[in-house]
Image (cartoon, rainbow, N blue to C red):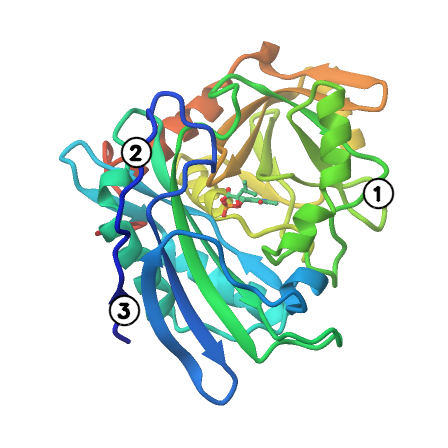
């Protein structure tokens, strides 16, 4: 499908890449393609970035008919630009679409929306260490009617923004609070989909954790309320007595692309990785016996983030002396090395633009 490009008449000033705040500095253009039942995807276009015109009765505004993705474009030392596993994001977008009765988007169209926009905005891809261009593709249901039904008119949109570290802590360990009241998702719900509703469900606990001085919430499963699931914007991994433990993909946890990349790297290095149920009790017991050696989160925005403190109610443990652990650092170095093109990419994860 041809993409019609309408350029912005005036370009914005680019932000200083040493002081980027995550997700605030949107670029000059955005990609949009429409979908109508019976007609399919049509009118792919790149237009100046700006407000969308949405009917106040549109389903997305009332019933959360929305899915999204997050990936990044990286500037390499030779000035070229590359993406990390973009087809995995599109595959997950289509899985989320299936859950929310949104239409499947052909992989090549979804990818073209990303690559053509990044090419047009290439001057926005920062080169300072630790920075990248964050890419946010999303799909919304736009039928203007208040009945609860899936939409026949849908848009897939891509916006991009230069970013630095997601947490103000950078690569310093973050403090994570295990939430015991609210739940993010349950099996059979939408936990495995990347959809706005899951994040709306997380806001109250997130605010409470922040008030207590914690960066994010670690969710427990919604049935037993005892097994670790994931953090607000990342999957979690633990090094316990030399082994790596991470919650299994039980239907309510997001199948993170950084998670699957880290598991692959850890296996390449000979680590035993157990994807299984992990109770909060098991973690605290491991911390008490000195077997909890490292904890970290994985995510596109968060990359590999060391966890320095875990708390639940009155219980609190410090992990790895509140320092970045050896494996956490090694994973961060290897993953970002591949992403920024400093180290070899043995699994073909990189797509050059
Ligand atoms: N879990 C949640 C809830 C997230 O929002 C994210 C971020 O995308 C992740 C996990 C990590 O997924 P990925 O590594 O694909 O970015
Ligand atoms: C990402 O890592 O891409 C995410 O989507 C996290 C986001 C919720 C900030």
**Which of the two residues, 127 or 241, is positioned nearer the viewer here?**
127
Classify 10 Å Cα crowding around label 2: few (below 14), some (14-19), many (20 and above).
Answer: few
Q: Earlier in the sequence, mark 2 or mark 1?
A: 2
Q: Marks 2 and 3, how far apart in space?
A: 26 Å
Place of residue 164 in the rendered image (x, y in percent of width and height, measured from the top left):
40, 29
Give the secondary structure at mark 1.
Answer: loop
- Please name which of the two marks, 2 or 3, marks the residue nearer to the observer: 2
Residue 225, disc: 1
Residue 10 vertical placement versus 115 (above, below) = above
The reply to whether dot 2 and dot 1 touch (C-beta < 8 Å) is: no
Place of residue 295 in the rendered image (x, y in percent of width and height, measured from the top left):
59, 26
Q: Residue at x 40, y 42 (%)?
A: 26
- Please name which of the two marks, 2 or 1, marks the residue nearer to the observer: 2
| Residue 236 appears in view | yes
Residue on which disc 2 sits: 13
Give the secondary structure at mark 3.
Answer: loop
Q: Residue at x 52, y 85 (%)?
A: 37
**Residue that protrudes farthest toward the left in the picture:** 78
Instruction: Say which quarter of the image contains residue 32.
Output: bottom left
Q: In the picture provided, is 340 more to the left or to the right than 205?
A: left
Q: Marks 3 and 1, how far apart in space?
A: 48 Å
Residue on which disc 3 sits: 3
Classify 10 Å Cα crowding around label 1: few (below 14), some (14-19), many (20 and above).
Answer: some
Give the secondary structure at mark 2.
Answer: loop
């Amino acid at each position: 499908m041809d993409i019609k490009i309408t350029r912005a008449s005036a370009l914005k000033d680019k932000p200083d890449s040493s002081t980027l705040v995550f997700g605030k500095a949107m670029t000059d253009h955005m990609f949009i393609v429409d979908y109508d039942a019976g007609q399919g995807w049509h009118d792919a276009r790149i237009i100046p970035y700006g407000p969308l015109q949405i009917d106040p009765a549109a389903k997305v505004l009332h019933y959360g008919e929305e899915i999204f993705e997050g990936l990044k474009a990286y500037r390499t030392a030779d000035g070229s630009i590359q993406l990390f596993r973009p087809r995995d994001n599109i595959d997950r977008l289509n899985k989320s679409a299936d859950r929310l009765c949104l239409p499947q988007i052909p992989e090549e169209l979804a990818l073209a929306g990303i690559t053509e926009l990044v090419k047009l905005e290439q001057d926005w891809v920062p080169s300072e260490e630790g920075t990248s261009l964050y890419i946010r593709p999303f799909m919304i249901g736009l039928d203007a009617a208040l009945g609860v039904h899936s939409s026949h008119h849908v848009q897939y949109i891509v916006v991009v923004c230069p970013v630095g570290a997601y947490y103000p802590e950078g690569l310093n360990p973050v403090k994570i609070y295990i939430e015991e009241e609210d739940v993010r998702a349950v099996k059979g719900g939408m936990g495995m989909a990347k959809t706005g509703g899951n994040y709306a469900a997380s806001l109250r606990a997130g605010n409470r954790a922040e008030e207590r001085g914690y960066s994010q919430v670690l969710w427990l499963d919604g049935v037993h309320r005892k097994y670790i699931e994931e953090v607000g914007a990342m999957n979690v991994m633990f090094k316990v007595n030399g082994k790596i433990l991470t919650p299994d993909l039980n239907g309510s946890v997001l199948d993170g692309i950084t998670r699957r990349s880290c598991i692959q790297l850890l296996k390449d290095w000979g680590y035993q990785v157990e994807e299984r149920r992990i109770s909060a009790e098991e973690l605290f017991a491991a911390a008490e016996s000195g077997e909890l050696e490292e904890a970290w989160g994985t995510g596109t925005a968060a990359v590999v983030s060391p966890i320095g403190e875990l708390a639940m109610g009155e219980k609190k443990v410090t992990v790895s002396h509140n320092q970045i652990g050896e494996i956490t650092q090694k994973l961060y170095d290897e993953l970002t090395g591949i992403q920024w093109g400093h180290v070899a990419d043995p699994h073909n994860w990189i797509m050059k633009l």
